[in-house]
Structures are given as C-alpha cells and as structure tokens.
Image: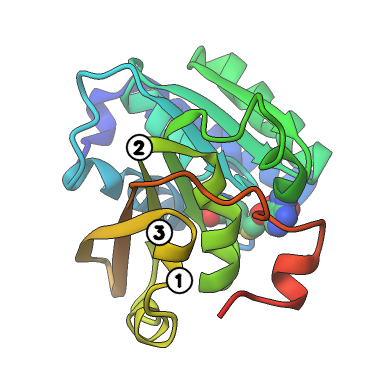
Amino acid sequence: MTDFLSNEQLQKLVPLFLDWNTKLNLSAIRDEASVREKHVQDSLLLGDFLNLGDQRLRVLDLGTGGGFPSLPLACVYPNLRFTAVDSVGKKLKAVQSMADELEVKLRTQHGRIEELGQDAQYREQFDLVLARALAPWPVLLEYALPFVRVGGRFVAYQGPGVREDLENFTGLEAKLGGKIVKVHETSLGDSERVFVVIKKVAQTSRKYPRANGVPRKQPLQ
Ligand code: SAH
C-alpha cells in the first residue's frame, strides 16, 4: 500500500477533491478519512497485483466520475499515460483541473462510451482499461473490451457480487474477445474487494459496443 506521506501529489489530491466535491457534488463520500480510504486507497489497490511501475502503458479509465481510479494512479505512476472518459462534462472539468494542478499525466475525454468504442482513435488502442462502479457486469464487458488492444488487459474493480456474475455470465468475456486470467480478492477496511483481470485475446466484433443506451437496455447474455 502506498504511503500517503511519501507522495506529495496524493497528499494534495485529497483536499483538492474535497473542495471540488463541495462545489459539484462528485461523490457522497465527503470526509477526509473516507475519501482517503474509499476513493484513493481503493483506486491504488491495482498496484498490489499488477506490475505498473516500469512500463509506459496507455491506460483508459471508463466512467471516471470524480477521477477514480485514474487520478490517484496517475500520482503514483508517472510512467503511465491516462485518458479518463465520462459523459458528464462538469465532472471532467474538475478531473482535468485536479490533474493539471497536480501536474500528472492525465487527459480527459468527454463522450459516451458506446460512441468512443466505435471510434478508431479509441477502439483497441489501450494497453490497460480500468472501470470502477460503472455498470452491471454484462454492460461493463460490452463497454470495456472494445477499447483494449489485443494482448492488453481490462481490470474491473468489483465487490463480492461479481462472483455470482461470473457464474451467471460464463463465457460472455470470450464472446467479446476476452479471457479471464485472474480474480484477485482483497479487503479494504470492512469492504471486500474483488478485481477481475481479463486479457484481450482476439479482436472484438464490430457489433460491439452497440448504440447509445442499448447495452444497458438489452444486456448481453
Ligand atoms: N469511476 C468513478 C465514478 C463511478 S460513477 C468512481 O469509482 O468513483 C459512474 C460514472 O460513469 C458516472 O460519472 C457516469 O457519468 C459515467 N458513465 C456511465 N455510463 C456511461 C457511458 N455510457 N458513457 C460515458 N460515461 C458513462
């Protein structure tokens, strides 16, 4: 676990986020200790089981909201290049402003995941795709896998409920070109956290992601 005191940018991020949160209502988590644990430390759990330190990966954070998990990760891993996507412009303005103030490598992209996933500038262009609290499991797979380059990975930040999803949607990742390579289970405070790592082993069919709103209305089986 990254020591807050040793990372100046992480130390600055917490008050910066609290300030934007009072202006824009980015998150229901409002006190400093909870922001540290439930947003910042949670985001950084990724580094406990993936080697992120010495590569120059292109990383995409889908549905970044107030900047999680990408903002804390950008503070700790200056070697990574982050793009953070959301359909809500005001959230992205806050995220870009925090990134600029912290001088971390993160750019924001406003738009719908369904559209960006069909855009050649984004489709199959990322070494690592991340998503936390974005969508139900089948929707998440349809959203995320089109962005991952073949050979790259998607890591989903999940809770214990994903175990049931993995049973109910067996093989769905394969339909989208993915292969589950790891399920990493850990805990943070009193919450159980489960990370699912999916490797992109084949291109995703051009059919996916389907048009705006369709993945949520008619989730894949
Ligand atoms: N990842 C953040 C925020 C989770 S809330 C965190 O863990 O705290 C989910 C976010 O995803 C919201 O900000 C919402 O605007 C965005 N989102 C949901 N569906 C989307 C879509 N189809 N395209 C773009 N953004 C989307």
Amino acid carrying label 2: it is Gly
Which type of secondary structure does the marked residue at label 2 adopt?
Answer: strand
Tag nearer the camera, 2 or 3: 2
**Residue 179 image position (x, y, % from top left):** 31, 58
Ligand 1 has an atom within 8 Å of the beta carbon of the residue at disc 1: no
Q: Which residue is drawn at 54% across and 40% down?
A: 147
Q: Which of marks 1 and 3 is in front?
A: 1
Cβ–Cβ under 8 Å for marks 1 and 3: no
Depth check, front residue: 84 or 206:
206
Residue that mark 3 sits on: 157
The residue shown at (38%, 33%) is: 73
Q: Which amino acid does label 3 sit on?
A: Tyr
Q: Which residue, given by chain and number where applicable, does mark 1 sit on?
A: 172
Seen from this angle, which residue lies furthest top?
Answer: 103
Spatial CA distance of label 2 from label 3 is 17 Å
Task: Name the residue rendered at 49%, 58% in the picture.
Answer: 176
Report how far apart the C-alphas of labels 1 and 3 lie in the structure.
Answer: 18 Å
Image disc number at residue 152: 2
Quick one: label 1 or label 3, which is nearer the N terminus?
Answer: 3
> Where 10 sits versus 115, above or below?
above
Q: Which residue is drawn at 77% across and 43% down?
A: 115
**The residue at label 3 has a CB less than 8 Å from ligand 1:** yes
Q: Position of residue 125 (x, y in %)?
A: 51, 28
| Residue 22 - label | none
Which corner quadrant holds the C terminus? Answer: bottom right
Closest to the observer, 26 or 32: 26
User: Which quadrant: the N terminus?
Assistant: top left
